[in-house]
Amino acid sequence: MKLWLLNHLPTPWLALLVVGGIIVLALVGSLLTTRLLPTLATGDNNDMVGVVLGMFGAIYGIILAFVIVNLWTDLQTAKTVVATEASAVSQIVRDAQAFPPVTRGAVHACVHDYVHSVVERQWPLMRAGRGDAAATSQAVDDLYRVLAAYQPRTFPEQAFYEKALDSLNEVAAQRRARISQSHDELPVLLQVLIFGGAAVIVLITLLYGVRRQGVRLLFVGSVSALIGFSLLLVIVLDCPYAGDMSVSPQPFRESALAPLW
């Protein structure tokens, strides 16, 4: 459900759905609470509610900050992995310029198949959380076979051959890391803690008494809006290859790889 929303709704619409939905539910809950328990408006329990709200808010804020920082770090790591992989593929194309025409053409054909498989086949699977190594396995295997069959005859060819092989090993490693990242998400227990904690904070705010209904609704709405935007950030960052903020495959279309498109 989360991946479907990220892939089918622009971020503003997703924000309206998540943040707006939480605000509306909180305001409706506030109106129902004051109707069912009118004595809350007197504020007799505000001292106790304030202490509980402050304690829960502090603990939840620390946990939420920890989660968001880690998710943001994971997103930046995913971008670095993609950029490193694309750079290594580009380097193979450059190193192949030192090879004989037949070998150079075979390398370019394999790289062409690889980048097209990554962008056109593997990326849609990763956006859906189903990253599969099979989409690019054949192209990687073909590259290894081409380099294994090539025998450098001069010192420059040997030097470029070793660099190309190192780059290919780097491609294989970063490809595996990228596919693994496409499956990653917050552990279930942590998701329960984040979303359950948000519900608890909002429910506690409903118990805070204010005689003027407008001020009470403003208080509840402000807290629920902050909670809503925090949850929206968690949802968006938890899926680095889905949504508007997702990692782009554009590096596989740039630099030395641009002529292959």
Image: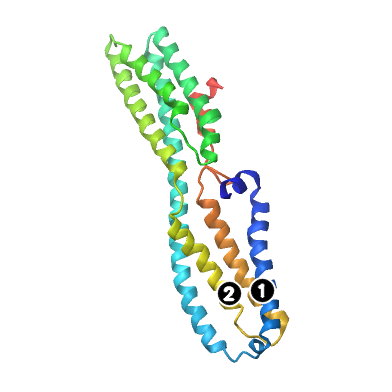
Q: Seen from this angle, which residue lies furthest front?
A: 36
The residue where tag 2 is placed is: 203
Give above or below for 188 relative to 89: below
Visible residue check, residue 254 = no
Q: Secondary structure at mark 2?
A: helix
Answer with mark 2 or mark 1, whichever residue precedes in sequence: 1
Residue 71 at x, y percent in the picture: 46, 53
Label 2, label 1: how many angstroms apart (C-alpha)? 8 Å
Visible residue check, residue 184 = yes
Which quarter of the rendering shows the C terminus? top right
The picture quadrant where one finds residue 4 is: top right
Q: Amino acid at mark 1?
A: Gly
Residue 176 at x, y percent in the picture: 39, 35
Q: Relative to the observer, which residue lies in front, 219 or 5?
A: 5
Residue at figure coordinates x 67%, y 76% from the top left: 30
Give above or below for 115 relative to 206: above
Residue 253 at x, y percent in the picture: 53, 28
The residue where tag 1 is placed is: 29
Residue at figure coordinates x 50%, y 24% from the top left: 257
Residue 75 at x, y percent in the picture: 47, 48
**Mark 2 vs 1: CB contact within 8 A:** yes
The mark found on residue 103 in the picture is none
Q: Relative to the observer, which residue lies in front, 259 or 20?
A: 20
Q: Amino acid at mark 2?
A: Leu
Q: Residues within 10 Å of mark 2 (few under 14, many from 20)?
A: some
Give above or below for 184 relative to 218: above
